[in-house]
Image (cartoon, grey):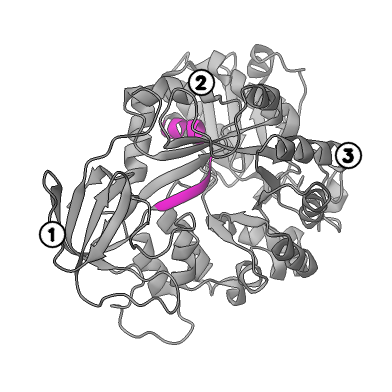
Amino acid sequence: MSAGALVSPTTLIRNARLVPLADGDRVSDGPVDLLVDAGTVVEVGPGLDRPAGAEELDGGGRWAMPGLWDQHVHFAQWTLASQRLDLGGARSPEEAKRAVADRIAAYPGLPVIGWGHRSAGWEREVTVSELDAVSGDTPVVLICGDGHHAWLNTTALMHLALPVRDSVVREKEWFAVYPRLVTLVGTDGTSPEAYRRALDAAAARGVVGMSDFEFGGSREEWAARWPHGCDRLRVRWATYADTLDEVIGAGLRTGDPLPGCDDRATMGPLKIISDGSLNTRTAWCCEPYGDAHRLEHPSGQPNVAGRELRELFARAHGAGLDVACHAIGDAAVAEALAAYASTGARGSIEHVQMARREDLRRMGELGIRASVQPAHLLDDRDITERVWGGRSERCFAFRWMLEDGIELALGSDAPVSPLDPWLAIAAAVHRSADDRDPWHAEQALTVREALAASVDGQPTLRAGSRGDLVLLDRDPLLRDLPRVEAGDTAPLAAALRDLGSALTMVAGRVVHDGR
């Protein structure tokens, strides 16, 4: 497909029920019709006339709402996830090593790329030499589930031109080397065919758009795959500092169509990873970790801070680019807010995993969006209690954010969590992945609030809405559920996790039809 505006069919959707996304929205209790023309909803009401030449779809009384967005995805990594050794269940280094040995025995001669282990819950640090002992000359790269460090054997270290050491590769050093993994495994996992499969799966979950924060990715790669069936969803592509000069030189501003694509693929923000992660103990905090005696940096540390951070914010802002600043620890959140305040930049803080209440109030005053990943709290609950202790009451503080006037935008950080908006919504509502009570239930969202934070700021469907919508077999507000005991959100979460899309439309085009 050539660059320019997409030509979409005129479509009349009959017999659909509207989902009110805001308290006080007044919508018809009965079925209505929706007319979508030129990628926009142009009319909503009962018994609409069918324009000449318009396609007609039967909604079958299903529930219609704006399509869902994942506001934080590493899409190339997500497409590769199905080919990687799944180490999410490894509870110790020994279990991870057994899985590696089994993979090498089953596929001798092939490199092993693993994903998903959570070493923060292991009782000891790992070494390169013990991985060498089970892998021999086969390259092995085991990427931690938060993406912030990797456990490599010596063969892999040498292949990727890294200094040989007996410890894991962390943070900036790992981010820099990640794009070179292609020299080990080739490009099959990021072919147009692989992308189409991943995009189709997302559309089946009701996803109409995503913000792509892939490490080492380029806008040219999206332009190259776009005409090969990878134009299913809306995409906002983010640049990192290493490609910022090229983006500025091309005159691209946030919201501009990417050259070589149509206007569904646009320039996103400058992504900055200002600190590390909880699992790697590199998130930058105001106070030391509970196991600080084991750490080189007892309170974590910034990747980018001070003058360097402000200069990046200012350059992006001056070039018309928003900023998406990764900040997990409370010190990193405060530093990011200071950079926003001093430069006038606009954008988001990604993750906001732990924050002081006064910083959230400032965030609301500055108009900075909170791009959060609720499913992370399911994975991080126990380690947070262990190493942040009493500070857990201000982790994933979604209720405070809403009270302080902060716009919430939900995402997954796939592949750290699955690219599944219903899992994120369920986690925001229930805050538990097992039989335990919700973790800090006082910070939970209502179903309506979580849905509203998942649709890229789109209102209840009406004339003027984007033609990005879904039809659902069940009312996503779950008003059909039997009354449950006050505060019992487990049935809500179970029902939300089972939801998917019967039909997904992007810019007026049907990209998934499972009716």
The residue at the point 48 percent across, 54 percent down is 456
Q: What stretch is highlighted in magenta?
A: 68-82
Q: Earlier in the sequence, mark 3 or mark 2?
A: 2
Report whether 55 appears left or right of 297. Answer: left
Q: Residues within 10 Å of mark 1 (few under 14, many from 20)?
A: few
Element type at marker 1? loop
The residue at the point 48 percent across, 65 percent down is 450
What residue is disc 3 on?
A: 307
Q: Which of marks 1 and 2 is nearer the N terminus?
A: 1
**Is residue 78 shown to the viewer in this render?**
yes
Q: Earlier in the sequence, mark 3 or mark 1?
A: 1
Residue 461, how many percent across, how many down?
34, 62
Amino acid residing under circle 1: Asp
**Which is nearer the eye, 71 or 395?**
71
Identify the image quadrant of residue 138. top right
Element type at marker 3? helix
What residue is disc 2 on?
A: 220
Amino acid residing under circle 2: Glu
Residue 210, how many percent across, how many down?
47, 43
Tell me if residue 377 is in the magenta stretch: no
Find residue 49 and name its label.
1
Residue 115, how many percent across, how many down?
54, 36
Instruction: Tell me the distance, in whole angstroms, between the alpha carbons under discs 1 and 2.
Output: 43 Å
**Which is nearer the eye, 105 or 425?**
425
Q: In this view, does 474 lie above or below 219?
A: below
